[in-house]
């Protein structure tokens, strides 16, 4: 498909959308300065927040979603010490969060887009604001992925997108597909219904990890075609996405071709999530792409700590991630209070 | 002389808003083009970048796809 044909469906308004200096962004641009910013609201990040907040440090937790992450996906936990189970990961995280917040930590459900770990204080740009912190504790987990579906990387920006709120307007009245099982996938699919038709929702499993009311809204939406247990075989297209080849129980495992113009992908993998470090500011990594840390969990970037699954433990358990967070928090407290040694906090 | 800066964006795009906020905080004037409202500008953006995704920044004729702080800094002479 050529550019002209693609753009013909872009918008109904030929008016001049130009404004000066982005005054329509609608962002909260107020500046906030914290002692420590914690990226990630899993067991490592929330344990770090508990300790830094309890030590009187101004602490902010930046969490993409209380449903995201490895612990949030776990249905039944019976072996977290001190918490008799069975308990869901989401419920255990709620307890972690409330305990940290009870000592004054600030919890913001915002995605971190970019950090400058070398500035002083360190600059953190989220989906809503720019904030500053003297220390960073990165606890973003290891559920990242690289482009792995056939055709995905080649057609990125040519119909393949990871951001419906960014690119949905390019697909007005066009058929699109959303691939994923998460709350983010459901929210983005619902956003796409403002523009695209139909929106094929291609779930890899049969259940979605999202609030029930969102799932109900998705499944009943007149513009959504819901499919489950879908295997994505290939995203097809030459210069632009022209369709996606899939197989699913609905087609009795036979290959099917969906003629969509856009494919929005929200899949997860097992790679450390470090995309908010850009280019030269990346901390030193191991050969496996994990973050190198010292015994206090500080990275090669001074004042930047990494905890939990980012460090690629041999054993991935919430209690070990929590312990990482505690050790990093104690080191942060020592650095900011100017002591040579970590003080035990009973 | 500082390069002219244009940001091609959509109003709901968090990366676009972050890029615009980044420029504003550094006092960089720019032209903000909403490609969800301006079809000709959208075509111009696709022609320049080969991309159907936003944000796209045109900094003195050099194209930056996405909110790429390092590239933006390099083209604007920031450190």
Image (spheres, rainbow, N blue to C red):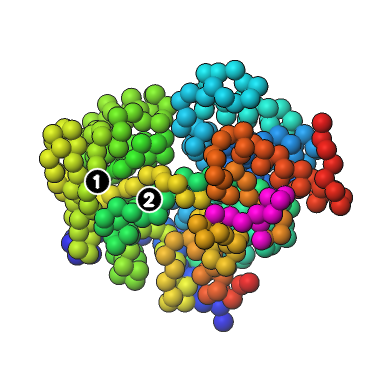
Query: Which x, y percent locates residue B72?
Result: 52, 69
Between B29 and A139, the residue placed more toward the observer is: A139
Kindly report which numbered mark, 2 or 1, lies closer to the viewer in this rendering.
Answer: 1
What residue sits right under mark 1 in the picture? Answer: A232
Q: Nearer the viewer, residue B39 or A96?
A: A96
Dot 2 alpha-carbon crowd within 10 angstroms: few under 14, some 14 to 19, many 20 or more:
some
- Tell me which secondary structure the magenta stretch mostly adopts: loop
Residue A56 in the image: above or below residue A130: above
Q: Residue at x 33, y 54 (%)?
A: A148
> Looking at the picture, does residue A278 appear above or below residue A73?
below
Q: Residue A53, position in %: x, y? A: 75, 36
Instruction: Bin the neighbour count of mark 1 within 10 Å (Cα to Cα): few under 14, some 14-19, many 20 and up.
Output: some
Q: Which residue is the extreme one toward the bottom?
A: B1
Looking at the rendered structure, whether the residues under marks 2 and 1 are on a common chain is answered as: yes
Q: Residue at x 52, y 33 (%)?
A: A71
Q: Position of residue A73 (x, y in %)?
A: 46, 32
Residue for badge 2: A162
Residue A222, x across and y down, in percent: 23, 31
Q: Nearer the viewer, residue A233 or A211?
A: A233
One can see residue A158 in this view: no
Mark 2 residue element: loop
Q: Is residue A121 visible?
A: yes
Return the disc, 2 or 1, that comes first in the chain's sequence: 2
User: Which residue is located at x 22 percent, y 48 percent?
Assistant: A233
Give the CA separation, mark 2 to mark 1. 16 Å
Q: Give, as a single range, the part of the protein colored magenta.
A: A290-300
Q: Chain of mark 2?
A: A
């Amino acid at each position: 498909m050529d550019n002209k044909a693609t753009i013909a469906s872009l918008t109904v308004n030929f008016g001049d959308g130009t404004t000066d200096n982005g005054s329509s962004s609608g962002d909260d641009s107020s500046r906030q300065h914290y002692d420590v910013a914690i990226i990630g609201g899993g067991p490592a990040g929330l344990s770090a927040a508990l300790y830094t907040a309890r030590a009187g440090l101004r602490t902010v937790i930046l969490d993409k979603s209380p449903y995201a992450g490895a612990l949030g996906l776990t249905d039944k936990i019976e072996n977290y010490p001190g918490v008799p189970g069975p308990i869901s990961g989401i419920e255990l995280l709620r307890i972690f969060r409330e305990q940290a917040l009870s000592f004054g930590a600030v919890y913001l459900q915002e995605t971190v887009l970019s950090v400058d770990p070398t500035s002083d204080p360190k600059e953190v740009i989220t989906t809503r604001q720019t904030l500053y912190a003297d220390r960073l504790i990165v606890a973003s987990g290891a559920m990242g992925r690289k482009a792995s579906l056939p055709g995905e990387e080649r057609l990125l920006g040519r119909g393949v997108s990871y951001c419906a709120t960014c690119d949905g307007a390019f697909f007005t009245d066009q058929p699109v597909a959303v691939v994923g099982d998460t709350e983010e996938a459901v929210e983005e699919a619902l956003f796409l219904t403002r523009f695209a038709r139909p929106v094929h929702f291609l779930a890899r499993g049969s259940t979605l990890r999202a609030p029930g009311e969102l799932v109900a809204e998705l499944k009943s939406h007149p513009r959504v075609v819901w499919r489950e247990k879908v295997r994505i075989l290939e995203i097809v297209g030459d210069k632009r996405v022209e369709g996606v080849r899939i197989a699913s129980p609905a087609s009795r495992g036979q290959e099917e071709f969906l003629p969509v113009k856009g494919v929005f992908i929200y899949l997860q993998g097992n790679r450390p999530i470090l995309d908010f470090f850009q280019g030269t500011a990346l901390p030193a990594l191991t050969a496996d792409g994990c973050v190198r840390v010292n015994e206090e969990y500080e990275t090669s970037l001074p004042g930047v700590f990494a905890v939990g699954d980012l460090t690629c433990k041999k054993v991935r358990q919430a209690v070990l991630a929590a312990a990482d967070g505690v050790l990093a928090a104690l080191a942060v407290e020592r650095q900011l209070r100017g002591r040579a040694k970590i003080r035990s906090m009973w | 002389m500082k390069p002219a800066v244009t940001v091609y964006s959509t109003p709901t795009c968090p990366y676009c808003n972050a890029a615009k906020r980044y420029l504003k905080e550094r006092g960089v004037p720019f032209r903000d083009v909403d490609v969800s409202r301006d079809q000709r500008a959208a075509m111009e953006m696709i022609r320049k970048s080969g991309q159907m995704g936003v944000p796209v920044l045109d900094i003195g004729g050099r194209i930056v796809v996405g909110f790429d702080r390092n590239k933006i800094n390099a083209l604007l002479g920031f450190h």
